Amino acid sequence: QVHLVESGGGLVQAGGSLRLSCVASGTIVSINYMGWFRQAPGKQRELVAAITSGGTTGYADSVKGRFTISRDNDKNTVYLQMNSLKPEDTAVYYCNKATNYFASWGQGTQVTVSS
């Protein structure tokens, strides 16, 4: 069974930075097309960044140039470096496969950006 554990969220002022981590067990992140998602109150979950097994990355327009997705194969961990944070980045952040999701989602990590 796949378990995904997200961490690294918190409260930060606009313009600040956070680095999120997603530790996976029961799967190998380097062979999967992995993504970071976020869900703000009253909104649908959206994919904000993804990384292919080959290391190619992609980003939603709303975060392009500010967020960077990466992974550490030895630690079986996917990261999301978030810079120049904006209040509209406030959401719960989750990791999962970018498509054909694992059935079980982690608990997510809350990111709150104050203005």
Image (spheres, rainbow, N blue to C red):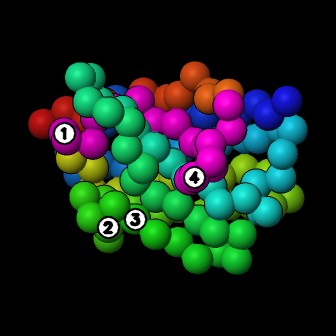
Is 101 situated above or below 58?
A: above
Q: What is the residue that sits farthest to the left in this orientation?
A: 115
Mark 2 residue crowding within 10 angstroms, few (<14) / some (14–19) / many (20+): few
Q: Nearer the viewer, mark 4 or mark 1?
A: 4
Say which label, 1 or 2, has the lower sequence index: 2
Name the residue rendered at 32%, 33% in the picture: 44
Picture quadrant of residue 87: top left
Q: Quadrant of the C terminus?
A: top left
Picture quadrant of residue 26: top right
Name the residue rendered at 58%, 22% in the picture: 107
Q: Amino acid at mark 4?
A: Thr
Residue 100 shown in magenta: yes
**Mark linked to residue 99:** 4
Q: CA distance from mark 4 to mark 3?
A: 14 Å
Picture quadrant of residue 95: top right
Q: What is the residue that sits farthest to the front in this orientation?
A: 100
Q: How many marks?
A: 4
